[in-house]
């Protein structure tokens, strides 16, 4: 382990596409999707061979602070950074980076989303090591996922010249493409999915933020001064919400002149919807992922999730003549939706908001 390596885990998302399991006080990173542990806890465990919990910082919403602390008790409470409002990834990463630099001016930092699934963890750690080589050379580095299909829901990274074995220059970042362009990217062989992981020397990122996002840079200087006085929390509560909501990709990475990408192929899934949950679940010969004891007759490709407090052993799910559906049941809500329209769960959440049903959100 490098004693100067620290990790930032971004855990402030709402996860509305996993309603009714995901709620405002229990978003998807706190749910056991794709395994038997909450996604956030699995993330902390996954990086432990490189970054122990005492050097992990978790950025989350202030309203999720207690639930986050309960989910990852191994992470010191003072390293849970409570954002008073969601402002996208640039303010999040900037504040966490400044916090780490106060503790360790020589910090090397790795940033991870909290809600991804990784099938091949040794290959994932190897990709981290390659990205950290780029960071050690003074680059802002990332891991790009080797695409398995022409996906239109992800941004892409075009990789360029070889910097070292398993490490390439970033030629450019590409927005989410249409189907034809996505097919072209996959055929070209040098385009990677942007998975939102970043690796850098703390001082390099701090300088890049000062150069490209001066408003956030000014906030960081005020935060450093407030930390010396012992009143950083008050300053964050007052000023953080006023920062521009900008992603680190648009705000810094796309403008920086020294970028590196490590291609990664380790069974990555961004667990973005109930479709992803079906992909990760154990399925029978007909592609059904069902609670134990369920009955399926002429039914294929279905996902049934029982999240009621009584549990699946109290309830029999029976399916006949239906295909490619998602059924999720909680104590107070039931979701039924075609798998191919799993992204539309957000529309249900929006409809509930419009009806004032905060009790279901």
Image: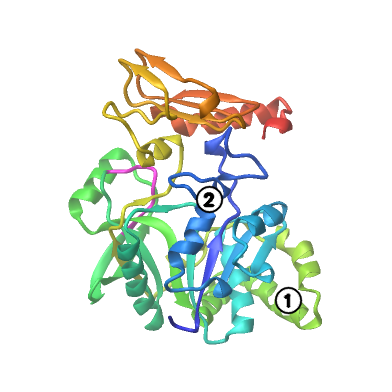
Looking at the image, which residue is at 44% across and 83% down? 2
Residue bounds of the magenta highlight: 150-157
285 lies left or right of 196 = left
Looking at the image, which residue is at 59% across and 81% down? 101
Q: Work out whether residue 261 can be spotted.
A: no
Instruction: Give the total number of marks visible in the rendering.
Output: 2
Image: 292 above or below 13: above
Quadrant of the drawing holding the N terminus:
bottom left
Q: Which mark is residue 38?
A: 2
- Structure colour scheme: rainbow
Secondary structure beneath dot 1 equals: helix
- The overriding secondary structure of the stretch rendered in magenta is loop
Q: Position of residue 226 (x, y in %)?
A: 77, 78
**Residue 280 vs residue 311, the one in the foreground:** 311
**Residue 236 vs residue 61, the one in the foreground:** 61
Q: Position of residue 232 (x, y in %)?
A: 76, 73
Mark 2 Cα shell of 10 Å, populated few (<14), some (14-19), many (≥20): some
Looking at the image, which residue is at 71% across and 62% down? 240
Quadrant of the drawing holding the C terminus:
top right
Q: Position of residue 221 (x, y in %)?
A: 69, 78
């Amino acid at each position: 382990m490098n004693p100067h390596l620290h990790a930032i885990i971004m855990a402030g998302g709402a996860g509305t596409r996993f309603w009714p399991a995901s709620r405002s006080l229990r978003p998807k990173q706190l749910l056991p999707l794709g395994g038997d542990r909450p996604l956030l806890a699995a993330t902390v465990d996954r990086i432990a061979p490189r970054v122990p919990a005492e050097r992990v910082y978790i950025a989350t919403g202030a309203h999720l602070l207690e639930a986050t602390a309960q989910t990852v008790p191994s992470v010191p409470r003072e390293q849970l950074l409570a954002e008073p409002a969601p402002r996208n990834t640039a303010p999040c990463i900037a504040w966490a980076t400044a916090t780490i630099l106060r503790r360790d001016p020589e910090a090397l930092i790795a940033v991870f989303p909290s809600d991804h699934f990784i099938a091949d963890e040794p290959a994932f750690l190897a990709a981290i090591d390659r990205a950290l080589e780029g960071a050690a050379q003074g680059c802002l580095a990332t891991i790009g996922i080797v695409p398995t299909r022409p996906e239109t829901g992800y941004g892409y990274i075009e990789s360029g010249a070889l910097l070292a074995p398993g490490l390439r220059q970033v030629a450019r970042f590409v927005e989410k493409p249409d189907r034809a362009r996505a097919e072209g990217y996959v055929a070209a062989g040098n385009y990677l999915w942007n998975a939102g992981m970043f690796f850098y020397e703390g001082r390099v990122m701090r300088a890049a933020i000062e150069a490209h996002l001066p408003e956030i840079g000014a906030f960081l200087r005020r935060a450093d001064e407030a930390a010396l006085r012992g009143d950083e929390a008050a300053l964050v509560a007052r000023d953080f919400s006023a920062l521009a909501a900008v992603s680190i990709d648009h705000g810094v990475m796309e403008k920086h002149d020294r970028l590196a990408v490590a291609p990664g192929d380790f069974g990555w899934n961004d667990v973005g919807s109930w479709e992803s949950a079906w992909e990760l679940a154990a399925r029978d010969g007909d592609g059904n992922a069902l609670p134990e004891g369920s009955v399926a007759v002429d039914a294929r490709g279905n996902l049934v999730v029982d999240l009621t407090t009584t549990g699946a052993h109290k309830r029999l799910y029976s399916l006949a003549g239906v295909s490619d559906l998602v059924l999720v049941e909680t104590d107070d809500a039931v979701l039924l939706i075609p798998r191919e329209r799993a992204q539309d769960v957000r529309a249900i959440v929006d409809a509930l908001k419009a009806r004032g049903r905060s009790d279901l959100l």
